[in-house]
Image: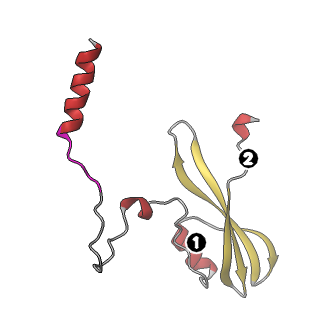
Amino acid sequence: MKTLAATLLVLAAAAEPACAQHLPPFGGPAPAPSYFVTTLSNIAPLVFGMDVEETSRALGTPLTYVSGRPGNEIYLTFRDLGGSGLFPHNDRLFLQFRKGRLAGWKADWGQNWMWR
């Protein structure tokens, strides 16, 4: 029974075409970025110099004021990054504005309250 299952597994694997990337020829153009690079979790649609409204629109979430003087504020937003299906996964994103323009941001994954 085990050999039959192993044989079927080998046949199924042999039927699938290989999808390996090939190296570009010497002196040729660089290949386009692969699917993996375009789906990294640290890619955010943020650009330095955006104002508060542009940032909120780019992230698709409302920004919540945390602290700072007018023009030099820190805002917080929660990004819904999906999850396992059982538990939603929301990450905090802190945004620093200087003179009304986006000067930096930092993702904060915090502590997982489930495993305390």
Judge by depth and name the residue closer to the eye, 29 or 85.
Answer: 29
What is the quadrant of residue 4 in the picture?
top left
Judge by depth and name the residue closer to the eye, 13 or 43.
Answer: 13
* Residue 38 belongs to the span the image colors magenta: no
Residue 95 location in percent, x, y? 68, 71
Q: Earlier in the sequence, mark 2 or mark 1?
A: 1
Residue 111 location in percent, x, y? 73, 47
In the rendered view, tell whether residue 36 sits above or below residue 71. above
> Mark 2 and 1 residues: CB-CB less than 8 Å, in contact?
no
In the rendered view of the protein, which quadrant contains the N terminus? top left
In the rendered view, tell whether residue 86 sits above or below residue 24. above
* Distance of label 2 from label 1 (alpha carbons): 25 Å
Element type where label 1 sits in the image: helix
Q: Residue at x 78, y 83 (%)?
A: 70
* Disc 2 versus disc 1: nearer the observer: 2
Q: Amino acid at mark 2?
A: Gln
Residue 107 location in percent, x, y? 66, 62
Q: Residue at x 19, y 31 (%)?
A: 11
Residue 20 location in percent, x, y? 29, 54
Q: Which residue is mark 1?
A: 56
Left or right of 10 in this view: 47: right
Q: Residue at x 21, y 42 (%)?
A: 16
Element type where label 2 sits in the image: loop
Q: Amino acid at mark 1?
A: Ser
- Which residue extends farthest front? 26
Q: Residues within 10 Å of mark 1 (few under 14, many from 20)?
A: some
Q: Which residue is mark 2?
A: 111
- Magenta stretch secondary structure, dominant: loop
State which region is magenta. Answer: 15-20
Left or right of 61 in this view: 2: left
